[in-house]
Image (cartoon, helix red, strand yellow):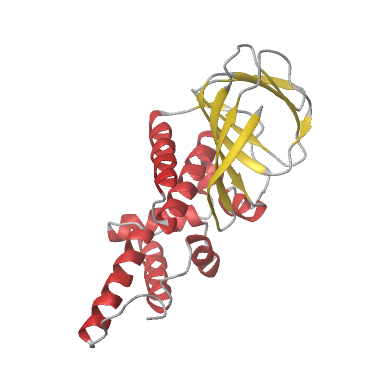
Amino acid sequence: MLSARTIFHRDGLEIADVACRHGRGRGTVELAIRHSVGFVRRGCFVRSAGGTEALLDPSAVFFVNPGDEQRYDHPHSGGDDCTALLLDPGLVASIWGGDPTLPSEPFHSLPRLDLAHRLLLAGARRGADPDELGEQAILLLATALECSDTPRTNSGRPGTSHARRRLVDEAREALAADPNQSLPALARRLAISPHHLSRLFRSVTGHTISRHRMRLRARAALERLAGGERNLAPGG
């Protein structure tokens, strides 16, 4: 028995808490319909796809592409639990050098990736700020792809400090006009990958785009209060 509970969905990215309670034995062949990145949290299973088999346990991260014919076999009873990042093709391409095809091989996760995954999962479960969750999820995806091909994931990053600072200034200018722009939308406007924009923004300003957005909103609210408004609720 397989169940997947969506705990975040925005801007072409969905976070799902996946629980499998399949008994020990061979699974059935199924056709994948979406791009996804899987982080195993508990248990283990064998994924067969593209003529190869991979044992996946809590040390593993794996990728799924639409159209993959895959089978999940379970060497033990007790099932397993995973976190899945389900992705629109455009988001994959924006991070992966323009190609919407994820890697075929899984890899052994790094401690910093495990920590980022767990923090994202905890935030999504408690309903943290959607802008912050979206930014964290994009950075987690980029870090996972870097483990497969760092040069490819780093392609398109501005090469000089002047170009990086100018890009961050353009992002700040755009957010000043409309702080509600999401990270993917802002990145498309500036013609840069969203993970590059997030990292550059933090390196130049010292804080994330989502934190900057919150500060702009707080200052706008203070200005409205100073102007005599007493009800800052939407529509108030």
| Residue 159 visible | no
Q: Quadrant of residue 2?
A: top right
Instruction: Give the camera-side residue of 74 and 115.
Output: 74
**Identity of the residue drawn at 47% across and 53% down:** 134
**Identity of the residue drawn at 57% across and 30% down:** 19
Image height of 154 relative to 104, above or below: below
Quarter containing the C terminus: bottom left
Instruction: Give the camera-side residue of 81 and 116.
Output: 81
> Residue 176: x percent and y percent?
37, 76
| Residue 124 visible | yes
State the residue lying farthest toward the left: 226
Compared across the picture, whether 24 is left or right of 14 comes to: right
Image height of 115 relative to 34, above or below: above
Q: Quadrant of residue 122?
A: top left
Image height of 159 relative to 174, above or below: above
* Total tally of numbered discs in the picture: 0
Image height of 229 relative to 142, above or below: below
Compared across the picture, whether 154 is left or right of 50 comes to: left
State the residue lying farthest toward the bottom: 227
Compared across the picture, whether 223 is left or right of 7 comes to: left
**Identity of the residue drawn at 29% across and 61% down:** 205
**Identity of the residue drawn at 39% across and 52% down:** 128
> Residue 116: x percent and y percent?
40, 39
> Residue 48: x percent and y percent?
72, 23
Quarter containing the N terminus: top right
Compared across the picture, whether 230 is left or right of 20 comes to: left
> Residue 37: x percent and y percent?
58, 38
